Amino acid sequence: MNLPGIKDIELERVTQPLEQAHTLPRAAYVSEDIYTLELEQVMYKNWIPVARLEQVPEPGCYLTLDFFGQPIMVVHGTDGEVRVMSSVCLHRAAPIASGCGKRHLFTCPYHAWSYDTQGQLIRAPLMDGAADFCEKDHQLPQIRSEIWEGFVLINLDPQAPALQPQIKGLTEYFKNFRLADMRIVKTLEYDSGWNWKVLVENFMEAYHHIAIHKQTFEPTYHARDSQIPDNSGPWSILHMPGMERTGEDPTNTGGFPAIEGLTDWQTKDLFAAVIFPHFLFATHAHGAAWYQVSPVSAERLHLKIHVMVPQAYLTQDDFDADAAGELAALVHDEDIFANDTVWSGLTAPLTQQGRLSPLEKSIWQCNQWWTRQMTAGA
Ligand code: FES
Ligand SMILES: [Fe+2]
């Protein structure tokens, strides 16, 4: 099938039924050639979350980010619509904005060309002698976007199928959590020296609770009870049933009531999900966490963990955003240890593909999807 540095026999081990399947070979994680191919075959063709609507709550609000080397901005237009566009100036390519904020005009720092909130060029000073030049012919390239449950997702491929019809099963599964009604209350940031798939795989299995989260998750969410439903879409769900609680609920830092409308099992269980390639989020009865993953190279990623709670909590006098973020920080510190350990082994030349546990069905699902994407059109 011709993936650089990967033998056919290695891919065949990956695509066996779960009971016989192996992990991806080490080149899938450490090779820059594979990473370059991933950009083309995976990152530029699939839906990737770039913001939450509450991060651009009013007309004029914007945020910028680097999308695999492409400077982009998410802008709440003065017409009320949220758009995503290139933020590279149409004159000589200086990015016209950085960070986040609120404004009705984006003025390039280089020669002061100004754009409105739809990316339309409004004013280009001292261009009088340029033949047939007209501001209205210039608009920043717009990027396809979709809003799902308060998340803004983009896709660089104009031909790619729309996201929402592909994730109906997942949408139904999380419907009661009303993610759209949640708000980010805390963001934790990390720079990590691992391939992005190491993070996704660790996020999507509960097998490691028995060793890595022995004190935090395993007492309530036993690894052996975790379940991963079959599905045919570009996503995976990890369901971690919770024990009947005798002590404190580790997810309920504020002592607030559970999200209204959850079923009994949704009130005590923990859920993690991935929409491929790397839109990761987890939910429990008192909120959610969005892991915003930004791969930087084969060996590096930037991660923002956005801790989210129901909007209703924010009006409570005793709501404490720091407390809401404590569990995420604690658990991620444990996962950093796990991922560092895995990375030190994956970079070793003698490392071979390993057998998967049936408890790692999500990894298997990710790998089937990844292999299909990477070999499509080959
Ligand atoms: S590069 Fe933006 S105005 Fe010149
Ligand atoms: Fe973990």
Image (tube, grey):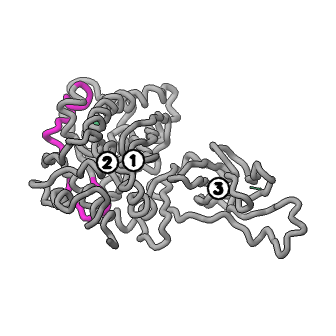
| Mark 3 or 1, closer to the camera | 1
Q: Which quadrant does ligand 2 occupy?
A: top left
As helix, strand or loop, the secondary structure at mark 1 comes to: loop
Tag 1–tag 2 contact (CB < 8 Å): yes
Report helix, strand or loop for mark 3: loop
Q: Please name the residue that numbered disc 2 is placed on.
A: 29
The percent coordinates of residue 301 (x first, y second) are 43, 42
Q: Position of residue 268 (x, y in %)?
A: 25, 38
How far is the residue under mark 3 from the one under mark 1? 25 Å
> Which mark is on residue 316?
none
Q: Is residue 310 positioned above or below 211 on the image?
A: below
Which is more foreground, mark 2 or mark 3?
2
Which residue is under mark 1?
A: 298
Q: Residues within 10 Å of mark 3 (few under 14, many from 20)?
A: many
Give the quadrant of residue 85. bottom right
Q: Earlier in the sequence, mark 3 or mark 1?
A: 3
* Apparent side of residue 358 relative to residue 240 in the rendered image (left or right): left
In the image, which residues are magenta? Answer: 215-236
Amino acid tagged 1: Ala
| Residue 63 screen position, x and y as percent | 61, 48
